[in-house]
Structure formats: structure tokens, C-alpha cells
């Protein structure tokens, strides 16, 4: 009796675990099937080389580059904010801060990641853009600079917390050797600890980029909905994620090409984040046990 | 010589100041943002705002339908993800140790955690809304969010089960308990605080999500609060998004007011999670 019950329970638990694999299979299947249907109607070469994205207009063009550039531009600005601040925080917390300070600051910073992204979108549109407009007069009401800036604040905890873990993993003996030669803490951090933890820091940055690339609500609210191939951070752009939201809110018939464009945008986004996550996973495993 | 030393010491103290500034900058900005929101929205919050249906006129609009939608979504997502997430976590820690399946599962879960939430929306749209014909209902929405937060719950479950020492299990086996009896009476009670912390954090993430639900087809305007799991719905983040996109100033005030309520809910859940974690860490020391 007990053996039978044990068996049933084990099977249920196994099934729960297998649901995660089914989820992955589901994502890959859904994206490839719909994208495949899309590419029977739109040339894949046009998709990756044309510079206009106008599926919802009468003169339809399906070049993904403007959406891709919008995504990369906002993510780049976000990393420009998050990398220096996150790294300084990580070095400060691991090399300088007393234990009490660290125990307080770490959960406080996690708060930044707990704020819903739609709230950050409100900040970007209602606080940051009006403020920047007083400094930069020609700036448009929707732009990638405010969206990227706020997104950068949001991903600071990803960079700081993972980088700090990497810095903490550097053995004390390396630091002691450096101090023994008369180095200050800053010199030790710059010349010894940060280089030794560099792979872990790179992993944190890649994960932060991946998060920024997939972020939706901030850019949908503050960066605009105009696909545009540009590196000018002051004008409206549209990201892959914003486009998916824009179509989902509108009235587009199922089984139309317009409907399938969101899966084409989706698979582009998925491949991008998948590549970033795979690289970070690979780096993490490769360098994990170097100092043990 | 001594000048160089002085300069280096100066740089060192300089960096320490920079470190403190860097640590504070994000939190200070967050405080400014929240202060601004409170100024915009606090006067708008009253009983009418919480109990009114949405309307074309900002001063008559309320958060009621979106809040009920969020509560429905929260409960249903919890009911779906709780057993599956914990079950998968237990399976990976207690049953599938070091098999090939467990290796695949592990890599797969860490990959899933990195998939953008909007992609889950596309999965939900195709599978739950279209193939299974659940429509753009609460059920489709909460199934989608449940899949989204599963990796978080599984990782949290595994971490807290890992913290239970092997000797506890051995003692249970020595008394003649079966594997499941050991898990049920020893492992789960001992790790429950940590598991609940993870579940609550995951649910607070789900409450704040808008993108996947928009893709699944949640509406920006729902005239009545949902009554069954098959009803159309809106949630607070989508209502906020909708109000932000409108030109009239009155809707911006509404958005700020709704954000205050949403932040109280998410920060409240986070506070509960942190409290549970610290209590659980204090109580249990093997």
C-alpha cells in the first residue's frame, strides 16, 4: 500500500519537473511554427536587410532592423548607467563596507528590482523626460534616453549583486599578498581582485543586458512607438517588445501576416536572449572552480 | 616617495566616498520617484477610487475592476504554481540526484529564468488562448504567469531543501520511515519558511507583470469585475499603463494613485517574505 502511494507521488513530482521542459518545447515550437508561416509570405532576406518596418500601414515593409536597433539602443544606454554604478557598488560592498552596512544595503538594493516595470515607465515618462527636456531643449517627449536611463537604474542590482558574489569568491590570500606589498585597498581592487573576478563580472553584465533586451513596459511607455533606424537617443524609437505590445493592444485578425509579425519579432528576441544566457552559462561553468 | 603614498591613500579614500555615493544613488532616485508619485496621486486615493468602475471621465474612474482582476490572477496563479513548483523542486533535490534527466532539467530551468516575460505571453496566446480555447480569460492569464514564475519557485524550493542536513533524513529512515514520509514529515516542515519566502517573492513579481497579460489579451477596459475564471479581465499594471497613455491630466493622477496601491501590495509582499526569511533563519539552526 505504502509502496504504491510512494510510486504515485514520485510520478507526480516527476511530472511537475517535466512541465518545465514542456514549457521550453512549447516556446520553441510556437515561435518557430508561427515564424515559419510568416517567412513563407515574407522573404527572410528582406526581413534582415530592409530598413523599414511598417506592417500596420498600407504600404507594408518587413525589415526588422529598426526594431532591433531600438532594442539595442535602449539596452546600451541602460548598461552605460548600470555597469559603472553596479561595479562601484560591488567593489565598495565587497572590499570596503563593514558587514553591518552590507547586510542592510543588499536587500535595500533588491528593492529596485522588485518595483513593477510599469511604475518605472511612469517615472521615465513623467519625471525623467521632463527633467532632461529642461537640459536638452530639442528632446522629444518619447525617447530612448529616458527609457534607457530608468532601465539602467532597474538593472543595477543584477550587476551589483552578481559582481559582488564574484569579488567575494576571490581568495583572501591574493588580497593579503597585495596588501603585504604596500598596496591600498583601491590598488588591490583594481589590479588584483577585479581582474581575478572578471569572468564573474562579465556574466553579471551579460545577464543584465539580457534583462534589458527583454524589458517591455518601460520602453513601451517612454521610448515611443515609431520604428526608426537611428542611434540618436533623443527621438522616439520602437523596440521588439514594444511592437509586440502595440499589436496585442490593437485589433489584428488571427492568421493574418500582421498577427504573425509578433511571432517573428518574438523569435528574434528569444534567439537574442537565449544566446546571451547561453554565453553567460558557459562562462560561469568554465571559470567556476579556478580558485579551488 | 611619501607624496606617492599620500596620493594613493587619497585616491583610496576618494573611492570609498564614490562607493557610498554609488550605493545611495539608486535608492535616492527611487525615493525621489516615489515622492513624486505620492505628490501626484495621494490626494486622489479615497474609498470611491477603490470601489468605482472605470469611466471615460478621470475623476469618476476607479481601480475596482483592475484590482479584482489582480486579486483573481494572484490567487489562481498561486494555486497553479504552488504544487507544481514545489513538486519539481522536491523531485530535483530528493529523487533525481545526478541522473541525466536532472542535468537536463537543471540547465533548462536556468534557461527558462532568462526568457523575457513577453515571450511567455506569446506561448500563452498560442497554447491557452487559441489551441485550448480558454480565450483571453483569467484562466489563460494565470496559467501563463504560473509558467513564468515556476523557475523562481523551483530554485527557492531547491535552495531551502538543500539546507536540510542529511542527518535528519538518515534519522528518519532509521526509524523506519519511507522516502515520502521522510520528505513529508521532516524535509518539507524544516524548509517550509524558505519555500514560502520564494513563493511570495515570485507572486509579487506576478502581480506587477503587465506585458505577458497584454499579449494574452487582457483588456485595458473591462466594465465589470470578473466573476468566474473564464471571464475577461484587466489587472492593475495594465490599467496604469492605459491611464499613462491618455493625454488628459486627470488620468495621470489616477495612474499615480493606482501605482501607490500597487507599490503597497508589492512592497508589502516583499516585506512579508523578508520577515519570514529572517524568522526562519533564526529558528532553525542544526
Image (cartoon, rainbow, N blue to C red):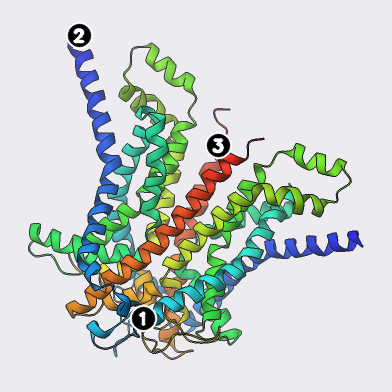
Kindly identify which numbered label has been placed on residue B51. Answer: 1
Measured Cα–Cα span from mark 3 to mark 2 = 40 Å
Q: Is residue A43 left or right of residue B132?
A: left
Q: Position of residue B283 (x, y in %)?
A: 60, 41
Residue depicted at 52% across the width and 53% down the height: A278
Mark 3 belongs to chain: A
Q: Secondary structure at mark 1?
A: helix
Nearest to viewer (mark 3 / mark 2)? 2
Q: Quadrant of residue A258?
A: bottom left
Mark 2 belongs to chain: B
Tag 3 and tag 1, C-beta contact below 8 Å: no
Q: Position of residue B263 (x, y in %)?
A: 36, 62
Is residue A269 in view? Answer: yes
In the image as oriented, which residue stretches furthest toward the top?
A: B1
Q: Secondary structure at mark 3?
A: loop
**Quadrant assignment for the N terminus of chain A:** bottom right
Q: Quadrant of residue B70?
A: bottom left
For label 3, the residue is A288
Q: Position of residue B48 (x, y in %)?
A: 31, 80
Residue depicted at 46% across the width and 39% down the height: A200
Tag 3 and tag 2, C-beta contact below 8 Å: no
Amino acid at each position: 500500500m505504502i509502496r504504491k502511494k510512494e510510486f504515485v507521488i514520485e510520478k507526480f513530482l516527476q511530472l511537475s519537473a517535466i512541465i518545465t521542459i514542456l514549457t521550453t518545447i512549447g516556446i520553441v515550437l510556437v515561435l518557430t511554427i508561427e515564424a515559419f508561416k510568416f517567412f513563407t509570405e515574407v522573404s527572410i532576406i528582406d526581413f534582415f536587410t530592409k530598413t523599414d518596418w511598417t506592417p500596420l500601414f498600407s504600404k507594408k515593409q518587413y525589415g526588422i532592423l529598426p526594431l532591433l536597433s531600438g532594442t539595442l539602443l535602449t539596452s546600451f544606454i541602460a548598461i552605460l548607467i548600470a555597469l559603472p554604478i553596479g561595479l562601484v557598488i560591488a567593489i565598495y560592498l565587497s572590499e570596503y563596507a563593514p558587514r553591518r552596512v552590507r547586510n542592510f544595503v543588499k536587500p535595500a538594493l533588491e528593492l529596485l528590482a522588485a518595483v513593477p516595470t510599469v511604475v518605472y515607465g511612469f517615472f521615465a515618462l513623467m519625471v525623467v523626460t521632463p527633467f532632461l527636456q529642461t537640459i536638452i531643449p530639442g528632446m522629444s517627449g518619447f525617447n530612448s534616453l529616458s527609457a534607457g536611463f530608468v532601465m539602467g537604474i532597474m538593472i543595477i542590482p543584477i550587476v551589483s549583486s552578481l559582481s559582488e558574489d564574484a569579488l567575494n569568491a576571490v581568495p583572501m590570500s591574493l588580497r593579503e599578498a597585495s596588501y603585504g606589498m604596500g598596496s591600498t585597498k583601491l590598488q588591490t581592487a583594481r589590479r588584483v581582485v577585479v581582474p581575478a573576478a572578471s569572468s564573474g563580472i562579465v556574466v553579471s553584465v551579460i545577464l543584465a543586458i539580457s534583462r534589458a533586451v527583454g524589458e517591455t513596459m518601460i520602453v513601451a511607455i517612454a521610448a515611443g512607438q515609431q520604428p526608426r533606424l537611428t542611434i540618436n537617443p533623443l527621438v522616439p524609437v520602437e523596440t521588439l517588445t514594444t511592437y509586440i505590445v502595440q499589436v496585442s493592444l490593437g485589433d489584428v485578425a488571427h492568421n493574418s501576416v500582421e498577427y504573425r509579425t509578433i511571432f517573428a519579432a518574438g523569435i528574434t528576441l528569444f534567439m537574442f536572449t537565449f544566446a546571451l544566457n547561453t554565453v553567460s552559462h558557459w562562462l560561469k561553468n568554465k571559470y567556476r572552480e579556478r580558485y579551488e | 616617495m611619501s607624496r606617492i603614498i599620500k596620493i594613493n591613500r587619497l585616491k583610496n579614500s576618494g573611492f570609498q566616498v564614490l562607493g557610498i555615493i554609488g550605493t545611495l544613488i539608486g535608492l535616492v532616485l527611487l525615493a525621489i520617484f516615489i515622492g513624486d508619485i505620492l505628490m501626484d496621486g495621494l490626494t486622489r486615493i479615497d474609498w470611491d477610487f477603490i470601489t468605482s468602475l472605470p469611466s471615460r471621465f478621470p475623476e469618476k474612474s476607479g481601480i475596482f475592476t483592475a484590482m479584482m482582476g489582480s486579486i483573481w490572477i494572484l490567487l489562481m496563479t498561486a494555486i497553479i504554481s504552488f504544487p507544481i513548483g514545489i513538486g519539481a523542486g522536491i523531485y530535483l533535490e530528493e529523487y533525481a540526484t545526478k541522473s541525466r534527466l536532472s542535468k537536463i532539467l537543471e540547465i533548462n530551468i536556468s534557461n527558462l529564468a532568462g526568457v523575457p516575460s513577453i515571450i511567455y505571453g506569446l506561448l500563452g496566446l498560442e497554447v491557452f488562448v487559441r489551441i485550448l480555447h480558454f480565450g483571453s480569460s483569467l484562466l489563460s492569464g494565470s496559467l501563463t504567469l504560473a509558467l513564468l514564475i515556476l523557475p523562481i519557485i523551483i530554485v527557492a524550493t531547491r535552495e531551502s531543501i538543500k539546507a536540510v542536513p542529511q542527518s535528519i533524513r538518515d534519522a528518519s529512515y532509521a526509524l523506519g520511515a519511507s522516502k515520502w514520509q521522510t520528505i513529508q514529515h521532516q524535509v518539507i516542515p524544516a524548509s517550509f519558511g524558505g519555500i514560502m519566502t520564494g513563493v511570495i517573492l515570485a507572486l509579487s513579481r506576478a502581480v506587477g507583470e503587465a506585458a505577458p497579460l497584454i499579449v494574452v489579451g487582457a483588456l485595458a477596459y473591462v466594465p465589470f469585475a470578473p466573476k468566474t475564471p473564464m471571464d475577461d479581465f484587466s489587472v492593475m499594471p495594465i490599467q496604469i499603463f492605459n491611464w499613462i497613455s491618455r493625454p488628459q491630466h486627470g488620468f495621470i493622477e489616477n495612474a499615480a494613485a493606482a501605482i501607490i496601491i500597487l507599490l503597497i501590495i508589492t512592497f508589502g509582499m516583499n516585506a512579508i517574505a523578508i520577515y519570514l526569511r529572517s524568522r526562519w533563519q533564526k529558528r532553525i539552526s542544526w
